[in-house]
Amino acid sequence: MRTMLPSPSIIDIYVFSFVIAIGAVITPGPVSTAIVSQAPRLGWKTGPLMAAGHSVLEFAIVGLITFGLGNWLAQPSMQTAIALLGGLLLAFMGGSMLVGNLRGRIHLPGASGGGTVMTPRQVVGVGMLATITNPFWYAWWVTVAAGYLAQAKAFSVLAVSAFYLGHITADLAWDTTLSTVIGGGRRWITDGIYRGLLYACGIFLVYLAYVFLGQGLKTIL
């Protein structure tokens, strides 16, 4: 697949990366699910902290791809492993969320209500864990993003940095917006709406698991 950055301009690459990232980050996934689960306890700070953990792993994968490991990550065997393992993890996460909701065990938490308020370090860790359980994250970086990074590297290291910064800015903007809305707690949403959001996230995670497990099994068979 041919990809093309708009120009060698650092600003152009930053804006371009931000725009294409928005389409990915607003799609429900493990990170947004974690924000929905934790923001009622910790508030708007959940989003930036999740984004911080997410950005650490994105920095690592950008470095791996830029310095020559992109081809290894894109090998069929690696893609199959990512699909199968990631699919199983997503099935467990989404299934647990749906079962908990159906059994009435999940309710809108509050900062002084049930549940433990995580420390900032713990939330950053959750952001990292949510990132590595998302097969789409691997798939996007070793396919589409790898092409853009190869072209950015041909321009300069600054161009690669601009692409990375544009992407994580989109993550930060969306995660903060989501946690601000959800973090309003009962002033913003009812218990029913909260459970509805978790149903939607759970269903989407199960759907992702179905897609990726299907792709992995198809490759093996």
Image (spheres, rainbow, N blue to C red):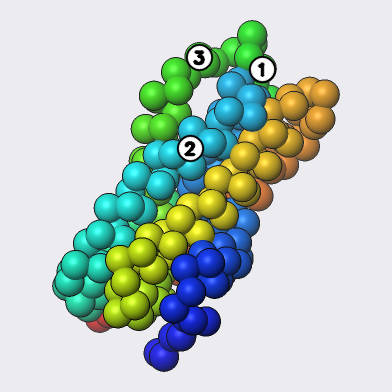
Determine whether label 1 and label 3 are within 8 Å by CB: no
- Residue 84 location in percent, x, y? 30, 62
- Residue 90 location in percent, x, y? 42, 51
The residue where tag 1 is placed is: 110
Q: Amino acid at mark 1?
A: Gly
Alpha carbon distance from label 2 to label 1: 18 Å
Q: Amino acid at mark 2?
A: Met
In the picture, measured across the screen, residue 76 lies left or right of residue 166, that is left
Determine whether label 2 and label 1 are within 8 Å by CB: no
Q: Residues within 10 Å of mark 1 (few under 14, many from 20)?
A: many
Q: Residue at x 74, y 27 (%)?
A: 184
Q: Amino acid at mark 3?
A: Thr
The residue where tag 2 is placed is: 50
Q: Quadrant of the N terminus?
A: bottom left
- Residue 134 location in percent, x, y? 41, 55
Among the 4 quarters of the image, the one containing residue 164 = bottom left
Between tags 2 and 3, which lies in front? Answer: 2
The residue where tag 3 is placed is: 116
Alpha carbon distance from label 1 to label 3: 10 Å
In the picture, measured across the screen, residue 83 lies left or right of residue 13, that is left
* Mark nearer the N terminus (2 vs 1): 2
Q: Residues within 10 Å of mark 2 (few under 14, many from 20)?
A: many
Q: Residues within 10 Å of mark 3 (few under 14, many from 20)?
A: few
Q: Residue at x 81, y 30 (%)?
A: 188
In the picture, measured across the screen, residue 162 lies left or right of residue 18, that is left
Q: Residue at x 54, y 72 (%)?
A: 12
